[in-house]
Image (spheres, rainbow, N blue to C red):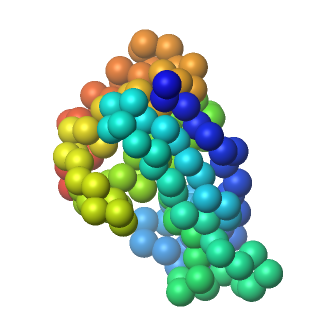
Amino acid sequence: MSQFTSDLYLRSYSPAQIIAAPGHVQLYEVTQAFSYVSDLLGRTITVPGRPDLSRPPDPTNSGYVTDFASIPRVAWDLLDPEDPIIAWPSVIHDYLYSQKGTLLDGFTYTRQQADQVLREAMEVSGAGFFIRESVYEAVELFGGSHW
């Protein structure tokens, strides 16, 4: 059964870090491993967290960094990227995209499968049909450049 098997722990980037980053969007660092069991892929996907929280953030010692869903600000009244029904699945989806079709253990998947995992995880999170399909269709249409 598809399910999140851990909680999502994050550190929000500071305004100075956001300004220094490409795109100037709010970024979050995963501070503890975050896992999701996907029936669609038949496996657990684990997003790495920062291994040593006692040290300051540093690119060589960091957890996975996400911006949640890349939803245009004008649509946030309908689709809030920080709503957990979108944010949690988006972290898994962002991680799958960042791995470009091959997980660390050698398992391979397609972009289409990564997008389907987003939809699957949104359903697990309690997202209704309209939200699930809107986010899924947007990723299908506009997400290719991030793959």
Residue 72 seen in this snapshot: no
Residue 101 seen in this snapshot: yes
Please, is residue 133 above or below residue 34 in the view? above
Q: Residue at x 65, y 75 (%)?
A: 51
Please, is residue 33 above or below residue 14 in the view? above
The total of numbered circles placed on residues is: 0
Residue 116 in the image, given as x and y percentages of width and height: 31, 32
Residue 99 in the image, given as x and y percentages of width and height: 32, 62
Left or right, 66 with respect to 94, comes to right
Residue 26 in the image, given as x and y percentages of width and height: 57, 58
Q: In which quarter of the image is residue 59?
A: bottom right
Q: Which of 12 and 97 is in front in this view?
A: 97
Q: Which of 104 and 142 is in front in this view?
A: 104
Q: Residue at x 36, y 52 (%)?
A: 96
Left or right, 103 with respect to 66, comes to left
Q: Residue furthest right?
A: 54
Q: Quadrant of residue 62?
A: bottom right
Q: Which of 63 and 42 is in front in this view?
A: 42
Please, is residue 102 above or below residue 18 in the view? above
Left or right, 142 with respect to 122, comes to left
Q: Nearer the viewer, residue 19 or 120?
A: 120
Q: Residue at x 23, y 53 (%)?
A: 108
Q: In which quarter of the image is the C terminus?
A: bottom left
Q: Residue at x 42, y 35 (%)?
A: 38
Please, is residue 33 above or below residue 74 in the view? below
Residue 82 in the image, given as x and y percentages of width and height: 61, 40
Q: Quadrant of residue 135?
A: top left
Left or right, 65 with respect to 29, comes to left
